[in-house]
Image (tube, rainbow, N blue to C red):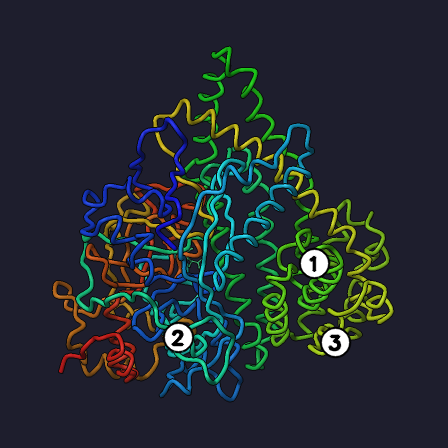
Amino acid sequence: MRGSLLVIALVTAGVPNMLADDGMFPMSELPRVNLRERGIELTAEQLFNPSEISLVDGICRVNGCTGSFVSDSGLIITNHHCAFDAIQKASTSDRDLLTNGFIAGSRGEEIPAPDYQVRITENYRDISAEVLSVVQEGMSFLERTKAIEKRRKELEIEAERQHPGLRAEAAEMFAGRTYVLFLYTYLKDVRLVFAPPASVGNFGGEADNWEWPRHTGDFSFMRAYTAPDGSSATWSAQNIPYRPKRFLRVQSAGVDEGDAVFLLGYPGRTARHRTASFLQYESRVRLPLTVQLYQWQIRQMEEAGVGDRSVAIRHASRTKSLANVEKRSRGQLQGLQRAQIVEKRLQQESELQSCIEADEVLRPKYGSVLRDIAAVYAEMESAGPLEIHLQQLRQACRAAAFGFAVVDAVHERAKPDIERESPWMDRNYAQSVQELKVSLRDWHPPTDVEMLSGMLRRLSSIPGARQIPALIPLTESEQICEQAAKRLIEGTRLGDAGFIEQSLGQTVDQLRATKDPLLTLLLDLYSSYRQLRELDKTREGRLSRLYGSLLEVKGQFLRTGFIPDANGTLRFTSGRVRAYSPADAVVRTPISTLRGVIEKTTGQDPFITPEPVLRAYGARDFKGFLHPRLGQVPVAILYDTDTTGGNSGSPVLNSKGELVGVNFDRCFEATINDFAWNADYSRSIGVDIRYVLWITGRVYGATQLLDEMGVALAE
Ligand code: ASP
């Protein structure tokens, strides 16, 4: 089946082969990449081959992260922070797996992670022409977006019909120009196998997050299961471990400074092809607001958890992910300024504009593109505070998130399937409901009172919010905000799984008749949220058309190729283990070691090192895991590949395609990667395979996992 699908080229026609150092290359671009020059001994076909088994068969996506199969029995290695939600959901104050870690003594003891899914890329094909065929002259921007959305869904449904058992997802590669349909295997029974204590897996916490040097053992093991016949199935005691077509060989010798490495993974989002006006919107509105709102939410959750571990556990996963984005946003704000990215992009755009102006054929067609794009972002800039606060109202307050999902589902389910928002289409409905139910488990009403009252208070001072009728009576004064939040949260049943289940099966009128106070508020606010959604789609339609034109005209002037921005699809990136200089006269070497863990250990969170690690360190129990030159167990490595969020958990592979580490982060300066890659400061961070094996096998004695991976412990 795979061989029959087309291999496509995404580079704009007429543009020479690209060999930029940056780049998250889609599989279709691999034949153009000079792998030898990059120090890689494998061929493009050995990495990805549509008709045979290749390395990518050993790579999977684990929720929003990446993972790799490391045994023929579905064993997956990924990051501790990627398995964090599963570890948290399985933790209680009596059985605190976050603090103590977890080792499944047998397959039967592995813990189901009901909101996890594993995805494997099977194939892809270009569908640009089929998608764009529905765009007609004279369509409004909203109509354009909706027509494209609908066509993408139709193609997905059609492909799933042709390939039973596989899932199809259409991805936009270049806005308004190229679309690719990916076929995936989805595995729905995923279980936790091994997690080190958070004091290893999250050593250094937020203080060290996005920093180098790093001493975090950010890895965990999970396992994917299937039905006995090998088909994808949700959890059942009868399920058997998944048999991947290929699994990665673990190379316990690791890598050294200067060695070539490459990564395969599922990077989430980048914005390299966006204009300076977009970056201005980011730096003036979205990023600062994210920092502000997340800092406040993190504080609320942390305060709620003081003195009550069970509450702290419930908030752990959300706090961690907000803190991750909050610090990344600060890094991006700083990086945008320091690297003068906006100025540089403005300069490039002004050169492009002059070329367009000087050409009589191009001028009428492209003369206003940059200006028109800037007009969209200017509109977003002025509407940003209201829009972002409204979105946050139903994210910060978890019960509002649950309630909005119900209201949205009920409205959408009343439409024909193809017109529904994607999560509520028949093919996605069960999964969306499952995720909603799992998220209810962490609900903590007192925190929600603080979140809701805080959001109402913030909204009360935003022009525009006071024009939304449902908000007026709730935001009249600080005291009213507080009282309203208390009344709404204390009176709601939206934290109750039974109520949610029942509500999902009702009509809008029946939802109203429940008289649930928070549900009623969300019903009243629904038209505002719907307007926001339509507005987003209108902007998307405008931008997609304009960016399509921009790319077209850029392709004619720049002697360089384009690689599509990251969009959660499979990508290749390569580089070398390399030092960097974050500031004048400062050079940071690229391998950290266990000595650094000990030096950083203060005994205070987040720099506590567990007893078993200290004991093994004291006993110099390192045989087989020492770095030959450094004479220490290496902990983390630094390399200049091009990565972003979603590459978390990506295998770090040596020149032969063997696993030598697990990617988990970037240095602070590289948070700016999302907007622009740079050879001087773009560095990614992975946990060294020797630390993974030492912690798992030597320190915590899970030797069965080393056996399963075919790694022998030195005697
Ligand atoms: N630690 C990062 C994240 O989870 C990975 C990255 O963005 O490079 O977002």
Mark 2 = which residue? 223
Residue 592 to residue 438: above or below: above
Q: Where is residue 448 drawn, in percent x and y?
A: 69, 69
Q: CA distance from mark 3 to mark 2?
A: 33 Å
**Quarter of the rendering occupied by the C terminus:** bottom left
The residue at the point 29 percent across, 37 percent down is 19
Looking at mark 1, is its residue's CB closer than 8 Å to ligand 1? no
| SS assignment at label 3 | helix
**CA–CA distance in space, label 1 to label 2:** 36 Å
Reading the image, the residue beneath label 1 is 393
- At 77% from the left edge and 73% from the top edge, which residue is drawn? 492
The tag on residue 499 is 3
Q: Residue at x 56, y 25 (%)?
A: 369
Which badge, 3 or 1, is on the more N-terminal residue? 1
The quadrant in which residue 373 appears is top right
Mark 1 or mark 2, earlier in chain:
2
Residue 496 higher or lower than 672, as above or below: below
Name which of mark 3 and mark 2 comes first in the sequence.
Answer: 2
Quadrant containing ligand 1: bottom left
Q: Residues within 10 Å of mark 3 (few under 14, many from 20)?
A: few
Q: How many marks?
A: 3
Q: Which kind of residue does numbered mark 2 sit on?
A: Arg
Q: Position of residue 612 (x, y in %)?
A: 30, 84
Q: Nearer the viewer, residue 646 or 475?
A: 646
